[in-house]
Image (cartoon, rainbow, N blue to C red):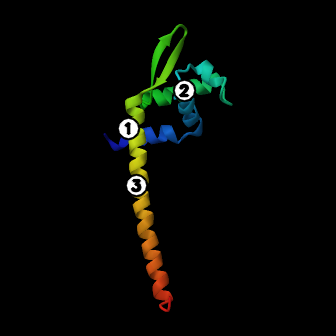
Amino acid sequence: MTTAVDDDLWSAIGDPTRRRMLDLMLRGDGTATSLSEQLPVTRQAVAKHLGVLDRVGLVQATAAGREKRYRIDQAQFTRAVAQLNDVGRTWDARLGRIKQISEAIAKNRNPQE
C-alpha cells in the first residue's frame, strides 16, 4: 500500500457524487445510464466519475452490450472502510489528548475548582 494509491483512493471517495454512486451500487450493479437516472448529473458525468472509481479499484467494469456494468470491488471497498476506521481512531485519540491538555490548562487557570 503506497501513499499515492491511498491519496487517489481518498480523493475519489472525497467527491459527494461518487459517494452517492457507491451508495447506489451497494444495492446492486449499475451502468452509467442507470446511475444517471438516479443522480442530478448527466450520463457523461457519471461515466467520468465511474472511470475515477474504476481507476482506484473501488469498482470493476464488465461489458454489457453497448455499455459497461459496474459493481463495487468488495476487497478494495473493505480496505477503504478499514482505513477510514483507522483514521477515526487516530483522530479520536488526538482529540482526547487535546481535551486533556485543555482541561489541564483550565484547571491551572482556576486552581480553586
Circle 3: element type: helix
Type of amino acid at the residue the image marks with label 2: Arg
Residue found farthest to the right: 40
User: Gap in Å between the C-alphas at discs 1 and 2?
Assistant: 19 Å
Circle 1: element type: helix
33 or 83, which lies in front? Answer: 83
- Any mark on residue 8, and which? none
Q: Relative to residue 79, is residue 103 depicted above or below?
A: below
Q: How many marks?
A: 3
Q: For mark 2, does the 10 Å Cα neighbourhood hold few (<14), some (14 to 19), or many (20 or more) residues?
A: few
Q: Earlier in the sequence, mark 1 or mark 2?
A: 2
Rendered residue at 45%/64% (across/down) = 95
- Any mark on residue 79, and which? 1
Q: Relative to residue 102, is residue 83 depicted above or below?
A: above
Q: For mark 1, does the 10 Å Cα neighbourhood hold few (<14), some (14 to 19), or many (20 or more) residues?
A: few
Type of amino acid at the residue the image marks with label 3: Arg
Q: Earlier in the sequence, mark 3 or mark 1?
A: 1
Circle 2: element type: loop
Mark 2 highlights which residue? 27
Mark 3 highlights which residue? 89
Residue found farthest to the front: 113
- Give how far across and how far down residue 74 sits, in percent: 41, 29
- Give how far across and how far down residue 92 sits, in percent: 43, 59
Q: Earlier in the sequence, mark 3 or mark 2?
A: 2
